[in-house]
């Protein structure tokens, strides 16, 4: 089995305090690691590195775990650039634009959707993301939701059934809720790990607290883990419902009451913040400092979608979190890696330690600080383990 020594690492972010300086980032300087069969088998000081079949010298670059994007809507056709332009001119957002994406997605062939999805996954991987969660939600019929999840499963094990994205035109709310929690759920559950719901009583298109509870409880009975779109457009029941039902993550968290923060502080539910949405909708940014001060676990994700954040760049989310959400660079990097892993309830990703996958993001920079310091620059690249290498 071929072993590859990766050396010349100026700064290694492990996210394992015991591997490094005792901080949450577990920093090491002048570090090296050995990879065999795509798994890390050794980490330590470069001067103490063992012999290996192949050596890759990074020349003083920083290395961190690949980004974990725990919230993305990648299965869609069409675009909503005109809607974006209208918002920049002052138009509001209430979720209604989703219907245009639904129409375009339903009209696309399997081959078209697969090609679009493959291109988006290639794009996000080039930006340093090694794990991505992919939602359905732009089909809103049994056949189209099932198709979306079948395609998503070709690219990620982290797939989410989001039949409860909005209520589509032409069907009564009660009838659609019955479909989402009944026949559609039965068909889609084998291709999903998670169920999600857009809980937003301020929007006529989304689902109120009682409807969201019905969706989540049905998903749990079907064996799916729980996720919630909550408190994006206004304060509402989404956050506390997520905590009550033990959801892995509640995402957006733009409008929070003190009771919401208190609930999250005492729970395992991760607050996943999506600053690209606020950037693209001119909405207020969530207050990450308030959550972190209360002891809440925070993740960052892109929410890549055609309507409210058409970006798959986790480095951009880190820069926005530092500039607009009140996070330090260290907190933002942790949230974009280990935080995302927590939001997916994964202990094997978002961390670099012996036995973990060699999901590496290499920066053309000496420190993780450059992710916020040089926003918009293509700093991330992968590691070439070479022909015939197992890593």
Image (spheres, grey):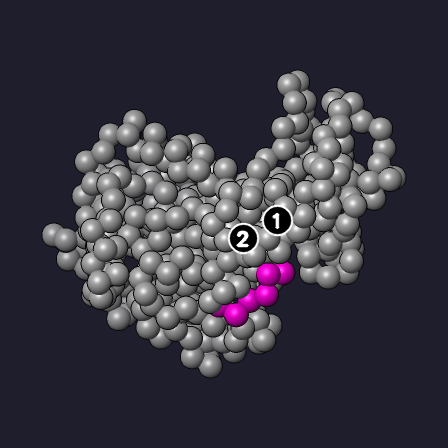
Q: Label the magenta part by its dominant secondary structure.
A: loop
Q: Position of residue 373 (x, y in %)?
A: 56, 56
The numbered dot on residue 374 is 2
Q: Is residue 217 above or below residue 189?
A: below
- Residue count near mark 1 (Cα–Cα under 10 Å), binned few <14, some 14–19, many ≥20: many
Residue 350's label in the rendered image is 1
Residue sitting at the far left = 170
Task: Identify the residue at image location x=73%, y=46%.
Answer: 10
- Between circles 1 and 2, the one closer to the viewer is 2
SS for dot 1? loop
Task: Identify the residue shown where x is 55% and y is 67%.
Answer: 327
In this picture, which residue range is highlighted in magenta?
Answer: 325-330
Which residue: 66% across, 18% down?
388
228 with respect to 25 (left or right): left
Q: Position of residue 41 (x, y in %)?
A: 76, 36
Asked where in the image residue 139 lies, by quadrant, the reply is top left
Point out the tag, 1 or 2, that comes first from the N-terminus: 1
Q: Per the image, is 179 magenta?
A: no
């Amino acid at each position: 089995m071929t072993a590859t020594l990766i050396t010349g690492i100026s700064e290694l972010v492990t996210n394992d305090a015991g591997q490094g300086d005792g901080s949450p980032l577990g920093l090491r300087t002048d570090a090296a690691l050995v990879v065999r069969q795509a798994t890390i088998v050794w980490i330590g000081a470069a001067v103490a590195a063992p012999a290996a079949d192949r050596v890759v010298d990074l020349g003083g670059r920083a290395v961190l775990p690949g980004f974990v994007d725990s919230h993305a809507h990648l299965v869609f056709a069409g675009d909503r650039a005109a809607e974006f332009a209208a918002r920049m001119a002052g138009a509001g957002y209430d979720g209604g634009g989703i219907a245009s994406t639904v129409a375009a997605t339903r009209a696309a062939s399997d081959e078209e959707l697969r090609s679009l999805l493959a291109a988006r996954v290639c794009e996000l991987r080039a930006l340093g993301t090694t794990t991505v969660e992919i939602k359905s939600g732009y089909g809103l019929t049994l056949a189209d939701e099932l198709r979306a999840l079948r395609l998503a499963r070709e690219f990620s094990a982290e797939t989410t059934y989001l039949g409860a994205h909005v209520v589509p035109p032409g069907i009564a709310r009660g009838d659609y809720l019955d479909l989402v929690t009944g026949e559609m759920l039965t068909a889609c559950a084998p291709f999903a790990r998670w169920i999600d719901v857009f809980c937003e009583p301020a929007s006529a298109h989304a689902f109120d607290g009682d409807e969201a509870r019905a969706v989540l409880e049905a998903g749990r009975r079907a064996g799916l883990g729980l996720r919630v779109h909550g408190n994006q457009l206004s304060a509402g029941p989404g956050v506390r419902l997520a905590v009550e039902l033990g959801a892995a993550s509640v995402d957006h968290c733009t409008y929070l009451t003190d009771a919401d923060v208190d609930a999250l502080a005492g729970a395992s539910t991760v607050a996943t913040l999506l600053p690209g949405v606020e950037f693209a909708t001119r909405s207020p940014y969530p207050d990450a400092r308030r959550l972190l001060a209360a002891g809440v676990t925070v993740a960052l994700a892109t929410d890549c979608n055609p309507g409210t954040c058409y970006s798959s760049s986790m480095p951009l989310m880190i820069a926005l979190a530092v500039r607009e959400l009140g996070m330090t660079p260290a907190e933002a990097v942790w949230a974009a890696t280990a935080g995302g892993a927590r939001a997916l309830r994964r202990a094997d990703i978002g961390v670099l330690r012996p036995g973990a996958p060699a999901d590496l993001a290499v920066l053309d920079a000496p420190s993780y600080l450059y992710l916020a310091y040089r926003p918009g620059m293509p700093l991330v690249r992968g590691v070439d383990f070479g022909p015939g290498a197992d890593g």
